[in-house]
Image (cartoon, rainbow, N blue to C red):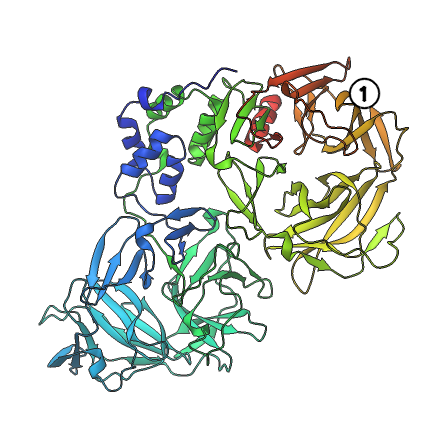
Amino acid sequence: MAPDAESPWSSGLPAGIPAAVLGRLPSHADRVRFAAVCRPWRAAARHHQHAPPSPLPWFAPLGGTFFSFPGSSAFKFPAAARYHGSCDDWLVFERGDNGGYLLLNPFSGDTTRLPNLSCVRNVVPDGAGTSGSGSVTLGITDDERAPSETSLRKMLMCPHQVVVAIVGDRRRGKIAICRPGADCWLISAHDPWRELRDIAFYDGKVHAVDERGRLYARAVGEDTRTGEPMVSMDDRVITAPARRCYMPATRYLIVSGGRLLMVHRVLRSDATSEFTVFKANLTESRWVDQPSVGADTALFVGQWSSVARRVSRYAMPGNRIHFLDDYAFSRHHFGGYPFSGDHFGAYDMMRDGRTCPLLPPRELHNDSDTPATWLFPREEEGAFSWCDLLLDVFGQVMRLLPSVDERLSLGLVCHNWRASVRRHQRRHPPAVAHLAFSNGRVFRYPEPTSHLFHDYAAFRGAACDDWLLFDDDDGDGVLRLMSPFSEKTRLLPSLSGIHAWDEPIEIENEPAPKGAPPEWRGANAMAVQKLLVCPDGLIAAIVGREYFAKVALCSLDTFAWSFSTHDRWRWYEDIAFGDGKVYALTADEGLLAFEVGIDGNTGNSVVSHVKRVIQGQLPRPSSAKVRYLVRSRGGALLMVRRHFLAGETTVRFAVFRADLGSSRWEEVSTLAARRSSWGGRCSRAVRARGTVRGDQIFFLWDECVPLWEERRRDRPDHHAGVYDMTDGMITDILPRRPRGDGPVPTTWLFRDADVDELDSDHNE
């Protein structure tokens, strides 16, 4: 096969086009998508300065790896590791030279400094509320009332270039004010040290809430006589606490839709968090319960930064509170007892307080005493939209793209470009299927082109749709689903922690297991044999070894595998999804339907009902056989039987349709007009196109060899073959390269974008 030709991006694309595109990007996230188009564009994005950030928050652990929200894409900011706190899109660092604090914007690279707490001016406000003439400059530790371990605990950027902060320890604090670059902080000498928990800028004033829910307000501005930030005394505007609480708790202040909200977070007895939202009624000086924050609004709360965002345009659910870990629940705050509950999560206000994980637990692991934080990048005023990109610029880009893969990558940039790519794909039809090798090379079929994905080598062999299954690099058993096309990653939990669901289940048309069910043999002996990603995000898999396996389910909401202890261990061949159920094909050609339920105690997805819908009846053993379960384009379940002779030689295929009404398999002689079937670890029925005709079965030579068959010492000369149902002839395709294809058998991959294009072409 001829080597791939180098993409002409670097030589053929006019130099001004990347700059024109970058100048019209509305957010940092769009620039990340821009960089995914090709390597020269990635280099252009890397060297272009002042990238506008995204309006959605970023999740920032301490290691310098940031996660965009709501996805789990990781971005590295090495200079941002080991921060002290955050504010908006600034990270706060403790300076090691002469003390003080450094503010760093990881998106733009801008920095500024804040003074050391060893230099604090205690100001006596006059009757007008402004800074009076009486003041003395001291260190924060010179105040006998100050906590012994005082540091910066919370920070706000207010108008007039004023920084307002809570300084103190994890129990008591005080409001301090300064300007970036100033030499000292300003503090009201008359204000007591209070149990302050959060601050927010609302209606021209800084509002602060204490541990009991009392709300204080103070004016912020500029002293007209000195030009310094104005220092005033606190004014208590809400006296009565919103709710008395004897459990570990904390409070956050958020401005949302012109309202000042207080979020009360309580640690329940089961170590999970419960949230209540209140609105400040400043006219009546009281808190009012808010059962809803809005169907298109989500709250993001944390120790350092909290904000409300409208999320409907990002296809995210509203009425949720996304929360991070907090000092209030640390071992230092509650008598040395470590908090082991839900440090991170999304609290659903409309579903009885159900909490879903933000990201898989391994990604959210935080060994530091400093809580993780949100970053809230600000949208730049006057930013352009992708719609503003000139059509002639887009046309030049499209004409210089040599392959369909690059055009599909271009369509990932934004909705408008995706629509334009669809219009252009008439001239370059999408691939019918892709063939993935363990060395990271992926071939398109029927076009004889390939692309090397270096980060996708050494997959385990299991695959589904466009996902490949990998072991995690850390050796903790966590699995990864990765798509070489979309570059998305889904983490799956380790099999070592699989949950054995012990509730009785009904098994229809099959005798119940006799005696005690066999025990799980451990993650080392068990493996994922087949994998299925269902439309609703549920992961189903055949988990076991050889002919000893069960159907296991994985819920990403709870990040846990589960299987039923009361279901049988069976010899499974394949699984498929249809009509809201998981169907499994056994080695005796029986078909079982698994209904999925939810464990009310753990929230895990579990098998709630099993029904054998077709009783297996093996034909006479004239040859070895392997079976695939494929859902047709019309929704029917098909069993594809592959017959072998000695030496692993495929001689023929037979196709059967599941007649669930009569509980039997009906042999069919055709796959219907313009249909082809692809069998293997990843099987699918697709619409025929071009050289891919109907009534053809594409298969891989290396996989699914019967266990009892003697293995061939020599490998086939081709990776795949095509069986023609009309004449029974087999044609070899995709010649094997003697070196470099990798030891793991190949697998088919199917991109939904390709399938959508095939269907749209047919419908038009």
Q: Is residue 231 visible?
A: no
In depth, the one of 91 and 541 nearer the eye is 541
174 up-or-down from 182: above or below: below
Sort mark 1 into few (<14), some (14-19) or many (20+) by Cα contacts within 10 Å.
few
Q: Residue at x 53, y 20 (%)?
A: 429
Outermost front residue: 713
Residue 481: image quadrant is: top right
- Residue 717, x across and y down, in percent: 63, 18
Residue 83: image quadrant is: bottom left
- Residue 82, x across and y down, in percent: 34, 60
Q: Residue at x 65, y 50 (%)?
A: 524
356 to the left or right of 731 = left
In depth, the one of 691 and 451 nearer the eye is 451
- Residue 347, x across and y down, in percent: 53, 62
Provide the residue designation for mark 1. Answer: 669
564 to the left or right of 7 = right
- Residue 297, x across and y down, in percent: 46, 57
Q: Secondary structure at mark 1?
A: loop
In depth, the one of 436 and 57 nearer the eye is 436
Q: Is residue 415 visible?
A: yes
Q: Residue at x 25, y 83 (%)?
A: 191
Q: Quadrant of the C terminus?
A: top right
673 to the left or right of 491 = right
Q: How many marks overall?
A: 1
Outermost bottom residue: 144
479 to the left or right of 419 = right
**Disc 1 marks which amino acid?**
Ser
757 up-or-down from 294: above or below: above
Q: Residue at x 50, y 82 (%)?
A: 246
